[in-house]
Amino acid sequence: MIWPIDLAILTLVVVAAIGALTVKDLLGASVLFGSYSFMMCLLWSVMGAVDVAFTEASVGAGVSTVFFVAAVFRTTRRTRD
Amino acid sequence: MKIVGLIIVVVTGTLLIYTAADFPAWSDPSSPASTYLSPHFIEKTMEETSVPNIVTAVLADYRGFDTMFETTVIFSAGVVCFFLLRISRREEPEARYYRHVLTGVTIQLKEGYKIPPSADFEQIDDDWTPPDLIIKTVCRILIPFIQLFALYVIAHGHHSPGGGFQGGVIMGASVILFAISHDLRTAVRRISEKLIGIFCAVGVLIYAGTGALCLLLKLNFLDYSALAGLLHVDPVTARSHGILIVEIGVGIAVLATMIWIYNNVSSAGRYRQGL
């Protein structure tokens, strides 16, 4: 494990998670969630869990973002709270 | 209500962190998993199953029962999406729109009239927009390569990262890309709703059926070395082949579920225009 990369990715994970929770625009939140998943994928591959990283990249960053965008498209883009 | 929620979250989080302190440290050589389980997998996987990728062997063979129910969870997710969102009541539109495929001429028919399904006319919705030529062409070029890569991931899961789940998701993503670049009606015309439902169930059936077949051949459930007689190979190679069979089952189930969920979510259960 290379600690500067590790630290940078961990910071980005936290930033993306807080951003996805606080942002009012749901489309932006789903995109932030996709970037969160991708950072998690990088984190798994840094730790050497390549299979988990692959799953995270395809399911978390790929298909679930599409599902979120589709759900936002069919409902509403602004949150009420 | 918000304060109650906050208190519950804080209490649960504290409890989780408190219990997590009892876990053995990361890569601790004296933890129970590292003393006998991991060394066994690392040393014996190759000679017991002839699969170089230990993760695949653990996932589909040693912990096969767990993976079977993961597949069932995916299957239930698709079925639940279908039951929650699908609107089966046929809404009779005031007018139907048809597009002549070759010339692109759109015709409107009054209520009660319809054109029988044929290759010349395709039914479209009133909010139909023509798919962009550039996006359409690029996706047409890209999709075969994505699908080929998905097949590679499923078939090569023994030697490299990947397997049924990842390959199935990539395969499903290629079909979703097709549905986005054209429209949902075109995608559903290619892969009908009925076919997706059947695929979903068949994937789980392949997995559970392989397990039951091992049971019929007088060994334990999901002990693939029982398939040696059927496949005409030695028991070690039979375990490797058994893993491939169940990975294909997982791939089919996941592929169908991804398309199913996308179809239902993107059209709000109406199977019309889509995104």
Image (cartoon, coloured by chain):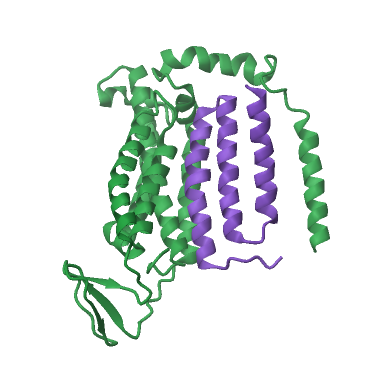
List x then y, in percent, for residue A63: 47, 48
* Image-quadrant location for residue B97: bottom left
In the image, residue B271 lies at what x, y percent?
38, 67
Q: From what the image shows, is residue A3 above or below residue B66?
A: above
- Apparent side of residue A72 relative to residue B11 in the rendered image (left or right): left
- How far from the left and from the top, in percent, is residue B5? 78, 57
Q: Position of residue B182 (x, y in %)?
A: 33, 60
Colour that chain B carries in the picture:
green
**Residue toward you, B270 or B50:** B270
Give the number of callouts: 0
Q: Colour of chain A?
A: purple
Quarter of the image with the C terminus of chain B in it: bottom left
Tell me the residue at 50%/39% (across/down): A57
Residue B57's quadrant in the figure? top left
Q: Is residue B269 left or right of residue B229?
A: right
Q: Is residue B222 visible?
A: yes
Q: Residue at x 34, y 36 (%)?
A: B149
- Vertically, is B174 above or below B98? above
Q: Could one spot residue B201 in this view of the protein?
A: no
When asked about the image quadrant of residue B148, the answer is: top left
Residue drawn at the location 39% of the way across and 32% of the way down: B215
Spot the residue most to the front.
Answer: B134
Whether residue B129 is situated above or below residue A21 in the rendered picture: below
Q: Is residue A74 above or below residue B195?
A: below
Q: Quadrant of the N terminus of chain B?
A: bottom right
